[in-house]
Amino acid sequence: MPQFPMRTVLGGEAVGGLLDQYRDVTPRGTVEFLRRLARQVEGIRMLNVNSTRTGGGVAEILQRLLPLFEELGVKARWEVMAGSEVFYRTTKSFHNALQGTKQRITAEMYEGYLECNRDNAKRLDLDAEVAMIHDPQPAALIDSRPRGAKWIWRCHIDLSTPQPTVWQFLRSYVVRYDAAVFSLPKFAQRLRIPQFLIYPSIDPLSDKNRELTAEAVNRSLQGLGVPWDKPILLQVSRFDRFKDPVGVIEAYRLIKKSHDCRLVLAGGTAADDPEGAAVLAEVREAAGNDPDIHILLLPPTAHLEINALQRAATIVFQKSTREGFGLTVAEAMWKGKPVIGGATGGITVQVIPGETGYTVSSPEGAAFYAKRLLNEPDRLAVMGRQAKEYVRHRFLITRHLQEYLAVIIQLCRGAR
């Protein structure tokens, strides 16, 4: 986790801290407002629990948010649950079922899930005034909530059309929380607890999103074995069927008929996703021996490499068929790139058709808009500039921090 810089106090305001580095990239007054807001919960102990410390957007967000909470006086901790391969296969089935793909979940799988949560409740330090429990994997920890603590279930996945039996099982635990947080209104469900809408975010100062020189971008591409000699079409995502990497290859083949370009599929697997290797094999088979298709299996720490790829790309895809939010969209838009994304989940609030990119439902649609942008470089440039400004006002980490603070204040106001 990043080290916290030293701060001094002048006139009641902290200066020289981590937050001050965001002044030049966030809307005016953002830092001052965060500090005023945080005074209402200064000294509170906050716990976050999820299922992996590396891989996936949730882990990345926590890595960047917690130091900012600390600077604002919130004593933030992060615990990661441990599970067997069977547990992660079960929760992957939960994930698929909750996002609308029919799964067979046996009584033994449900019991194994609960047993793993009980074991983790004994192992983890759950002592905090506020806890944010992320996604289905640790949801049953609510059985072990300390007396008087406020617990929030933070759902990062698409719950718009869940498999009823799986959702009813999970719901029996969710309704015992003090609140739930969803990424989109259509993900919310009928619950008897307060629900909040909070978009995820990117950190503009992280290695994945900070400015890079053209020389640094070129060095990274050389290290990855990707020539920068023709337009690059890029998708960055885990090798997951919901991300539709094979569909991106189909779109590329249609584009290639009229435009000489390269396709880069860059990503990895998450520690809690046992299907990644099988999907990667399918992608490699679909790519065949095409020398202009580059499949990059990157480690979770390859932030600079992803940054460089997004800056080198001409057009970025995120052709998901199901998506919780899809922060790779905001990442690419922050680099001034229009995005062609699947018309699903959080992609639909990031990509404004005709303004910051296009949303599509087929490889043919993705190819059509990509060819249009390649044929109209002026349009491509204008959409890229609009995309960056849209992210500045909607999807930066400072806005995310502000809204989490507001939820904590709301829940703790009566107790303090």
Image (spheres, grey):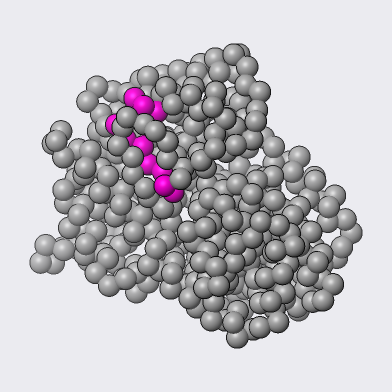
Which is more toward the observer, 20 or 394?
A: 394
x 37%, y 71%: residue: 25
x 75%, y 46%: residue: 280
* Residue positioned most to the left: 11
Q: Quadrant of the C terminus?
A: top left
254 up-or-down from 105: above or below: below
Does residue 374 appear left or right of residue 195 in this picture? Answer: right
Location of residue 329 in the rendering, given as x and y in whole percent from the top left corner: 55, 61
Q: Is residue 399 visible?
A: yes
Does residue 290 appear left or right of residue 306 in this picture? Answer: right
Location of residue 80 in the rendering, given as x and y in whole percent from the top left corner: 46, 34
The part of the chain drawn in magenta is 174-185
x 72%, y 53%: residue: 245
Location of residue 41 in the rendering, given as x and y in whole percent from the top left corner: 19, 45
Q: Is 392 within the magenta?
A: no
197 up-or-down from 273: above or below: below
Quadrant housing residue 383: bottom right
Q: Is residue 21 visible?
A: no
> How many numbered marks are there?
0
* Residue positioned most to the bottom: 378
Location of residue 23 in the rendering, given as x and y in whole percent from the top left corner: 31, 71
Which is more toward the observer, 285 or 5?
A: 285
x 38%, y 58%: residue: 397
Q: Is 175 within the magenta?
A: yes
1 up-or-down from 10: above or below: above
